[in-house]
Amino acid sequence: MYKNWLLLFLLLPSISFAQKKNNHFNYHIQRATSAIKVDGDPAEKAWQDAELVTNFYQVLPMDTSFARVQTDVKLCYDDKNLYILFINYDTLAGSYMVESMKRDWSFVRNDNDLLFIDTYNDLNTGYSFGSNAVGGQWDGLMSSGSKVDLSWDNKWQSETTFNDDVWTWEAAIPFKTLRYKKDVLSWGINFSRNDLKSTEKSSWTPIPRQFPTASLAFTGNLVWDKAPPKPGANISLIPYASIRRTINKLDGSSANYIKDVGFDAKIGLTSSMNLDLTVNPDFSQVDVDVQQTNLDRFELLFPERRQFFLENGDLFNNFGYANLRPFFSRRIGLNAPIYYGGRISGKLNNKWRLGAMTMQTGENADKQAGSLYSVFALQRRVFKRSYITGLFVNRDLIGENAKDAVNPLSAYNRTAGIEYNLASANNVWLGKAFYLKTFSPFKETDNSILAGDIARNTRHLSVSAQFESVGKGIRGNEVGYIQRQNYVSTNPTITYLFFPKSGKILSHGPSGFMRNYFNRDSGKNFEHLYFMSYVFTMKTRAQLTIWTAHDFVRLQSDFDPTNYTGKLLKAGQEHQWQSGGFNLDSKPQQLFTYSLGTRLGGYYANSERLRLDATLGYRFQPYVAITMSANYNRLMFSSTDGRLPVELLGTDHNLWLVGPRVDVTLTNKLFFSNFLQYNNQTNNMNLYTRFQWRYSPASDLFLVYTDNYYADNLNLKNRSIVLKFTYWWNV
């Protein structure tokens, strides 16, 4: 049955393979007729001679007309840089809306310009660059047709100027920053503007409102007068030096000074193939993860932010689903030092992409053996936007302790898989199907995964269906991330939107999904979630969601419903409950913003759970942004339910996660962040303060102070202060 389902899925791509939607939109770029100084002032002759783009199309609030706010765009180039100029005209009085001058700001909370470049015209991968109205930069790598990974930073420069009725963004993007095939005369490109005063999002090419302006399926063409300049010797060295003073009260050690040096290197093997090297990397000393209250049965998944893993990272990290990842790069170096690593990735030609990576880690603090990780990916584009990817992941223990019986890792863990990604030319049909098999010394026979999904998105109606079949012998969490084993799941979803012709409501409509899990051996349902919601979106972009849900769980293993007391519900017990709530997000145009949410209803063992969420923000444009986030969960356990451990009977638990934050941006090169995280579920309070000076493009000086305390008595756990210097040197 599963093979028949997969065969039907694979036939669906024949629905649409036409030429890309906006192929008739062309911008003809020419060499600059004069030198350009990047200062936000388009006075140079080169800008007077460049071709003009104007008359953007409105995407939001509705995609049926030209934009009301005028935006002009021009491009040109010289031997070293691609130059971009946005001139943004205003139709309404008032100040520009921005959070701050910090880098990689939130798109929905800032007046901004964005550039999307698809250098291979494959409609799937590319680059995004942009700025908000006061010069805060944005840059990211694009994958999967519209995803933008803002963790990526690279070397480029831009400036903005503004007055009461116009603001201008000018940028220079070095060709060394981009990857592209030589002698190709056409790239995909699009321009986007978000104007909060008019609540309008617009684009150079027409884009249906259900898709982001980042959708590469809707790009036009950047037509070169002759082939783009060759980047030449494309070698970048990124050395760092750091000194760190630490105090660890948990093990009773005295103050410790640690001095480190290391480097990353980026070497362009060809104009489209890159070699990344890292030696003694310092991946973790200038940032911390935002904590979350975890009342789920699975570990939390935090995103990858380390630069070494980001370029072409979609080749490795996007395989599978968020809950079924054969490779998750944050497993590498988890509580263990990374000695070195190397990675080759990029385009072989217009059809093929290649990625190969290896990294070695050392022993961790518990003297457990290090590992050698190897990952290989090969991707082939098929039809217009779809592609097939093969993946192989390997981890071997190394060193003297590799055969230590107490080591929690198996001697080796290997995964092989193949994945087909579907994307129709008009972006209406999306989906994927993949097959994985894992290998380890335990020799399980039921060690495969078969999964797939298909979705159709139109203006009014979005429907999707997802299927997963996971064996009980899967051993994926040593290198990847897999939540459950030995199950088959189905997950149909449907959303419908109404668009009133008048009034304050832009759209409203219902949405629902059913997620069921069945034992793969017996076929019995052991878990389901039925969810219904109704969403109101205002023309101001404020949004209200009202929802209700029904949960059923037959526990497959013992579980602590508080995730911190250690008092366990037993495997095999059945639990079900109803819950409901709402989420309210304010319009982003105001200085004071808020997001409110609640959940009220049942919980495990006939208990009750109340959850309250609130995020309040105020900005003193453009220098200071203050945010207060709070998450409260009250667990009220029944005194009569015999499934509960005795210690939980008749007790209430109040879980708090509170996080005030202050971001100060003195300029778009000087940043100060300070936040506090109080989490009584993990009995931890974290104080984090960071000063960052971007003294040169992609080069930084950091000063970071971090404290961790016990939340119940405020006694110190550990403390560190770090001074770190990085420099990006193009050889």
Image (cartoon, rainbow, N blue to C red):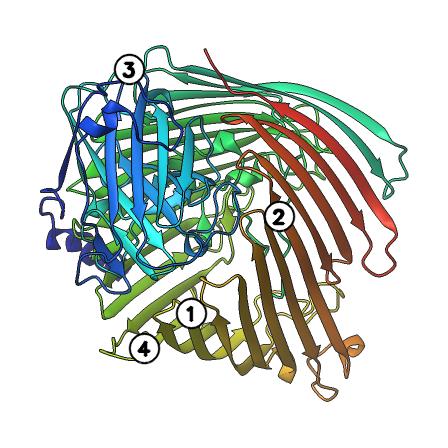
Q: Closest to the observer: 502 or 333?
A: 502
Q: Mark 1 or mark 4: name the one nearer the start of the chain.
A: 4
Crowding at dot 3, Cα within 10 Å, few <14 / some 14-19 / many 20+, comes out as few
Residue tagged 1: 542
Element class at badge 4: strand
Q: Is residue 714 visible?
A: yes
Q: Mark 2 or mark 1: name the one nearer the start of the chain.
A: 1
Q: Mark 2 or mark 4: name the one nearer the start of the chain.
A: 4
Which x, y percent locates residue 497? Answer: 27, 74
* Count of residue discs: 4
Which x, y percent locates residue 41? Answer: 35, 32
Residue tagged 2: 663
The amino acid sitting under disc 2 is: Asp
Which x, y percent locates residue 85? Answer: 30, 35
Residue tagged 3: 79
Q: Is residue 595 above or below residue 687?
A: below
The amino acid sitting under disc 1 is: Ala
Distance from the alpha carbon under mark 3 to that under mark 1: 46 Å
Element class at badge 1: loop
